[in-house]
Image: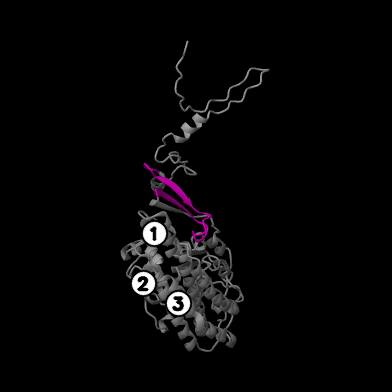
Amino acid sequence: MTTTKEPRRAKAPALPSVAPAGQAEEPRIPDPLELDAAATAPRPEYYGFDIVPPPDRPPQTEREREIYTLGDGEMLVNMGPQHPSTHGVMRLVLKVRGEVVIDLDPVLGYLHRGIEKLCENATYTTVMTYVDPMDYMSAMHNEHAPAIAFEKLYGIKAPRRAEYIRALVVELNRVFSHGLMMGFLALDMGGLTPILYSFINRDQVVDLLSAISGQRMLFNFFRVGGVNFDVNDEFLSRLGTWRAGVLDTIEMNEKILTENEIFGARTKGMGVLSGQQAIDLGVSGPNLRASGVPFDVRRAHPYSIYPELEFEVITQEGGDTYARYLQRVAELKQSIHLIDQIVDRMPHGPVQAQVPGIIRPRPGRAYAAVESPRGLYSVYAISDGGPNPYRFRMRDPSFISLQVLPKLMPGHLIADTMAVMASFDPIMGGVDK
């Protein structure tokens, strides 16, 4: 009797059979036709992404439910905390559909060190050593704000020469911070050469600052009532040599970036932040002025010797990634102009007021704000009459800038995420203070 053979069909892999006791199980050789059929079977459009693991814990807030609830075709992508372009230890959770960003959630806290509480358990002089590593790209500005606040509490003023030296070192710090931003913005988009030119300028400035402070990165230069060291003729000579060639390295980067067609295509119109949005979200510094708002702490709330110096509050109108780049280039050149004025007008005299080793200010409170390379950086200190600050709080501008990203990124591509974020120039040491 002849039997008709049924066509072979792709079957799911069979469960392993258990052989009776005492008998060896014969190995099953898979049928090649079964393998071919399984490989060519139609798959859904988002095969492999239909099951998304839940977050580390159930959503606690309405915002978390919004970001972690996925619609059709959406998935979550972790960018960081090991990503080299997250400007420190930060994790960005991207909700994407294809390559388009639908939502974004910055996850902070990987670098938390509790600097504010450390400062409340340190003397007023020792506080200066704790704030240095916070925003490690602008350590001089980190020291400037608490120095002003503590001087208000103690009721003293730094000598005029000390104030000139303070303004000199913070503007030098601004030069290398903005210069590095130019390089890192290009690096985050795949360009290597600009960061090399940026580090030429950075190393030259750091050599100058280490010559006057004794340290290369965390300077510990400011003191309550003045500065730690005076400038000498050798330092001023080296400063003049640097000043003669600094614009050359800046112009090299500008030639590579400013008129570069690829750089312009990836920055112009990306991450547009309007002036009103920037004000509503508390953005300050170059990011605010790049949106057309002429607010600079050095002009709006003058401190140190800035009322005696001539400079303009530069703004841009674009409010996009390209405008934030141009803003820092313009402010970098303006800082060089300020350095020229400071050196020409620096008076003679002492650099430190008469202050005891252990300071005990009268009970009270003081607030001080400075214009750091990332925006308004301020300190609020309360004294109870003891040798340590009773309360010490810092406002870091990078922390404020990060809340802008979820407003700007929806609709952009994943590849644009790093360019937009780098244009705000955040430093995670200050965010996770």
**Residue 178 position in % (x across, y down):** 46, 71
Quickly name the residue at label 2. 295
Do the residues bearing badges 1 and 3 touch, measured as CB atoms within 8 Å? no
- In this view, the residue farthest toward the front is 2
Residue 51 coordinates in the image, percent (x, y): 45, 38
Q: Which mark is residue 318?
A: none
Mark 3 vs 2: CB contact within 8 A: no
First reached walking from the N terminus: tag 1 or tag 3? 3
Image point (36%, 72%), residue name: 295
The amino acid on which the numbered mark 2 sits, given as a three-letter code, is: Phe
Sort mark 1 into few (<14), some (14-19) or many (20+) by Cα contacts within 10 Å: some
Magenta extent: 69-98
- Which label was assigned to residue 404? 1
- Residue 213, can we see it? yes
Q: Which mark is residue 251?
A: 3
The answer for how far apart the CA atoms under marks 1 and 3 are is 30 Å
Choose top left, top right, bottom left or bottom right for residue 386. Answer: bottom right
Report the amino acid beneath label 1: Val
| Mark 1 vs 2: CB contact within 8 A | no
What is the x, y in percent for residue 432? 51, 59
Q: Residue at horizontal 32%, vertical 66%?
A: 275
Of the pair 207 and 359, the residue shown nearer to us? 207
Q: Secondary structure at mark 1?
A: loop
Give above or below for 160 relative to 416.
below
Marks 3/2: CA–CA distance: 27 Å
205 displayed left or right of 407: right
Inspect the magenta stretch and tell me whether residue 77 lies in it: yes
Type of amino acid at the residue the image marks with label 3: Glu
Residue closest to the eye, 302 or 388: 302
